[in-house]
Amino acid sequence: MTPAGTIKRSSTLALVAPTVLIIGIFMVVPLGIGLAYSFLTAGPYGGVQQPPTFDAYIQLLFDRDFDGSLVFSPSYIFIVLRSIWIALATTVVCLAVGLPVAWYIVCQSPGRRRVLLFLVTLPFWINTLIRTYCWILILRDQGLINNVLRGAGLVGNPLPLLYNDGAILLGMIYTFLPFMVLPIYAVLERIDPRLIEAAFDLYADRWDVARRVIWPIAQPGALAGATLVFAPALGSFLAPDLLGGGKKLLIGSLIQMQFTSSRNWPFGAALATVVTVAILLIFAARARRAGEAMP
Amino acid sequence: MSAGAFDWRRTPGLGSLTGATLMFLYAPLLILVVYAFNANRLVSVWSGFSLDWFVVVANNADIRAAAFNSLVIAVVAAVVSTAIATAGAIGLARGRIGVAGSLAGAFIVLPLIVPEIVVAITTLIFFSAIGMKSGLINLIIAHTVFCIPFALIPIRARLSELGRSYEEAGRDLYASEFALFRRILLPLLLPAIASGLILSFVVSLDDFIISMMVSSAGSTTLPVYVYGMMRLGVTPEVNAISTILLAVSVAFVAVALLVGRRLQRTDFSQQE
Amino acid sequence: MIEIEGLGKSFPVKGGKNVEALKDVSLTIGDSEFFTLLGPSGCGKTTLLRLIAGFEQPSIGSIRLDGRDVAGLPPQKRPVNTVFQSYALFPHLSVARNVAFGLEMQHVPTAETRARVQEALAMVRLGELGARMPAELSGGQQQRVALARALAPKPRVLLLDEPLSALDLKLRKQMQAELKRLQAETGIAFVLVTHDQEEALAMSDRIAVMDSGEVQQLGTPRDIYDNPHSRFVADFMGESNLIPGHELGRDPALTIAVRPERVMLGGTATSRTKGTIASITFLGLDTVYDLTLTGGTRVRARRRDIGETLGLGDSVSLHWPPEAERELRA
């Protein structure tokens, strides 16, 4: 007997089915197929063919020598490590900037808060492609910075600001900063102002209050923001591709390459599997942390 | 509060930091817009204000085709995903589910967690595996999938905010389940549904990486086409079309905000 | 007429267990009765109300409305209407359309609907406000709209879930009188849920005092106030001293309940026991004395006429007439 106030089981299934089916068929199944493909052989023109093999995963770590023996090749490992390092750096910078900014916004009047939040969030809705491209305009040899510097006579030849890790980092920070501010803001907004006042009343100075009252409360928000930045940054494609010039590879562009010029679908699928598993683990760890944190 | 009195809300330096951050966020976009209006073909040299490049872009048949595709895809994906999301949100919030519910809950977050590049290539793999040739349909399906969570989240939030008592009151006053949905639930959900529609529309319009992997020469979206242009070099046409895309995004967000604000005013949330 | 027999309701909670919100409740509510379910939070009164309304299904037992078993009937099919604690007025509909809702759902013809809406609004004295939106009304007005909306379909029973809890004191007193008047005017059964015992005493024909999912005592206001059957009821209704038997030299298994206003201090009557004055509080009309008995029990006396003769630390004798006390076991 269904308690009144809820919908019958059959109706519930009918309502939820389209969501489950669409996502199931067009996302979960493809993920499964991707996983399967990572265990197959690369086809000559892209695609895959039999027989099944571990080659794709082996390729991550080893090269095959002329005589067929395996030689340890760290190049792909380096790419993975570089991606992690850049994603980490992005996260740290976003945190370092996002936390104080979020706190500043919380301290404003409700009207100003709304305006500031809107301004911080708006870039999130603008096409990432456009946002990344802007940095090309600024950083390239004939770009804004170099033009200004040369025009002012400060440098003779243009500075190579583009096509390096720094440019990629800049582009990623630019993309992900809003992601960090919002979760932290959400947590800080709930602070009872009297907590702060009580701390000051008990002889704390600003630094104490920041360290011992604000930061502990901000932590879950910071963690959420960090996850929201690190995970996509790891798999990011546009910044490494456009700002890295295609020479500096990160995981995202490496994967993409396998499906275009390199025509090695299984390898791409293997890379994708590794990245996805890593990210799912991060989210799972965070979910467990959040679950434990609740009393 | 008199000047000089201690105000813990004023931390010295934070205002400047926030201002600098906002400048950091918006300056690049402004620079793009300025360049787009530069009459000179050499992007780095300013020679006057001009709309020339916008005209060139507007006359480019390829761009128009790509823009048309993007629009069609976004509209269809937004409508379909919002409809599915509305049903799903209601089912999850008010229905009896057990394992199926947690499964659905996990599925819904999936498009947000899995990296876009992975979604892109696995979608490509999928269509290739089932032998579906590239076309608008593929893009529409792919977009609908990742739009569903964006539409579902505001609707689910609104449902939980509303609480059950309006529906109980409706039932108490003899409303059938269908009348309940049509006369009570739907009107009260409208702001969230509108929000979901606009959100999915913008997200679909903006999508790049998934569209890139799934599209083909014949059916391409605007961001993918513009990316192609960018790879060939920085040109004023690129600046112009980018500015247009920028303006469209901003316009939609503004509309979403206004719609949300207006609908909010005629509403009053549950007491207690 | 509502007949409830052996009604019980359990809810599953986290950890796989069940919590019994209602245990084996049986009572009958008459056709034109003002019946109140009174008790502290968590006693099961709201659960009972929701079971009558049809928002929950009983785990065991039965509910009969006019002889008809309603278990299994959804709220839509029961001739019972509810006034919710939060009012639950539909925010997107005007006052008039809110009140008309139940009638529209029953497919009452438009002309008749309009007339009955006006009638209902007039009954709660809101005749002029039909065109307004709920957000524009004060709390008291919203409450009356909720009443009108529930009364318009002319149900057999009106259920009220703590309807006055959101109102300030003065408004609450006014509404208590209003509700009593409405019930007399409509002649239908009102079932009210409240935790405020004064409210229950003021409005009800009969009260069911509930605790921990069970009916502790059922009776008229006078009955319950003067003859509490248990410690709990004695303590819950008004203020009551609960003195263990051994402090008075009587059967230690007994608890003696005496209201503070009946305890007399000093004087020539036979003393029941002696106590030391621990505090004196002057309240204007009354003076409250808190005393400690030899065994440590605190007793409160509320007197009107004693004057300055007693002071802190004084040892006095306490007494009260036999009819002022109740003997209770647990």
Image (cartoon, coloured by chain):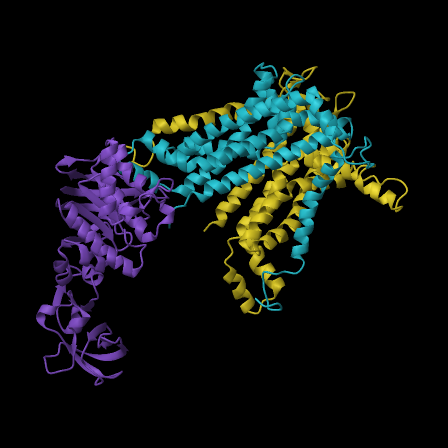
Chain colours: A yellow, B cyan, C purple
Q: Is residue C243 left or right of residue A194?
A: left
Residue C5, given in percent of the width and then of the height, sits at 15, 42
The answer to which quarter of the image holds residue B25 is top right
Where A188 sits versus B28, above or below? Answer: below
Left or right: residue C274 versus residue C143 is left
In the image, is residue A283 above or below residue C311? Answer: above
At which x and y percent is residue A188? 54, 53
Residue B99 figure quarter: top left
Regarding residue C50, the answer to whether it shows in the image is no
Residue A19 x %, y %: 47, 28
Report if residue B216 is visible in the image. yes
The residue at 53%/28% (across/down) is B78
Q: Residue furthest front?
A: C128
Asked if C274 appears above or below B135 in the picture, the reply is below
Depth check: give the residue in front, A36 or A120: A120
Please state which of residues C107 and A7 is positioned toward the viewer in this rendering. C107
Give the left or right position of residue A2, taking residue C215 as reference.
right
